[in-house]
Amino acid sequence: MDLWEKFGMSEGIAGLWQELGISAGTAIVVLVALYFVIKWAVKNGIIEACKKIEEKKLQDKLKAEISESESGSAPEKN
């Protein structure tokens, strides 16, 4: 029994992998490695996006505080 049949791969996909000279075990290792690379990239992308959002919020907060302090410290003319 072929490993492709054991894992329930269709003949078209199994034929494609076999034409490339890749066995079922190698294909599984490659797919698992690809899974973790994509997972790592998505995780880092989300972390980077969260940092940028936090930086933007902090900058907006500082701008608001600066504008409040400038408007509050200026003497009002009557």
Image: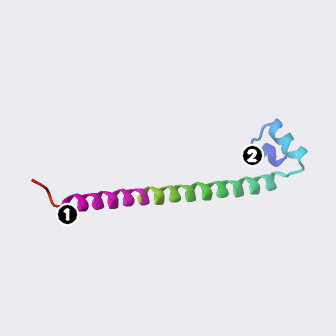
Compared across the picture, whether 43 is left or right of 71 comes to right
The x, y position of residue 77, in whole percent, is: 13, 55
Q: Give me the disc on residue 7.
A: 2
**Is label 1 in a helix, a strand or a loop?**
helix
Look at the image and give the residue range highlighted in magenta: 55-74
Q: Secondary structure at mark 2?
A: loop
- For label 1, the crowd category at 10 Å Cα-Cα, with few meaning under 14, some 14 to 19 and many 20 or more, is few
Whether 59 is among the magenta residues is yes
Residue 3 spot, x, y in % from top left? 81, 49
Q: Label 1: which residue?
A: 73
- Residue 4: name its quadrant: top right
Q: Is residue 18 above or below residue 55?
A: above
Q: Amino acid at mark 1?
A: Ser
Distance between the Cα atoms at labels 1 and 2?
A: 73 Å
Q: Amino acid at mark 2?
A: Phe
User: Residue, x 28% and y 61% (percent of image)?
Assistant: 65
